[in-house]
Amino acid sequence: MIKVRCSVCGNEKVGFCLIKKTKIKPNKSRKCTAYVYDESKVKTIQNIPSIKFGYNEQQEQKRLMKEERNALKAVKKQLSLDGTFDNESETEFVGNQKHPLTGDLSRFTTTAVKNEE
């Protein structure tokens, strides 16, 4: 008698053996005389195509990305020197200096009742 797995047996249904009338673990290997091979339960392995880059292609891609990043930095630096791109004017503070995070708190009113005893 050879060891088989119940996961591809025709007598196994949802972790239950129809011959032995017991609950089983389908992927556990065991000796069984009532084993019937069921080809419909066999899962086929799908080959997923993938693209792999070699070392030279990876280094070339890194070099191109670095050149683009440096070009963008140069353009940003040139615009900031010309005065056309100024970070300070975009982030100018508009609000109440007394309460810089929340603004003026006088607009809030309370609904709590004071105990007058």
Image (cartoon, rainbow, N blue to C red):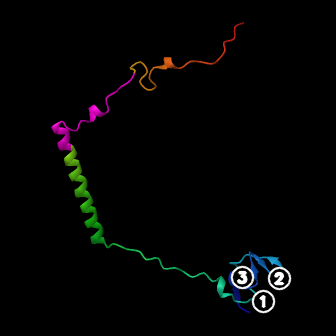
Residue 9 among magenta residues? no
Is label 1 in contact with label 2 (beta carbons under 8 Å)? yes
Highlighted range, magenta: 77-95
Mark 2 or mark 3, earlier in chain? 3
Secondary structure found at label 2: loop
In the picture as drawn, the residue positioned furthest to the right comes out as 21
- Coordinates of residue 9 in the picture (x, y in percent): 71, 85
Classify 47 as above or below 108: below
Three-letter code, disc 1: Ala
- Coordinates of residue 104 in the picture (x, y in percent): 45, 20
Residue 90 falls left or right of residue 95:
left
What's the residue at 70%, 87% (across, down)? 3
Classify 57 as above or below 62: below
Residue denoted by label 3: 6
Residue 84 among magenta residues? yes
Please tell me the numbered disc located at residue 55: none
What's the residue at 83%, 82% (across, down)? 20
Residue denoted by label 1: 34
Three-letter code, disc 3: Cys
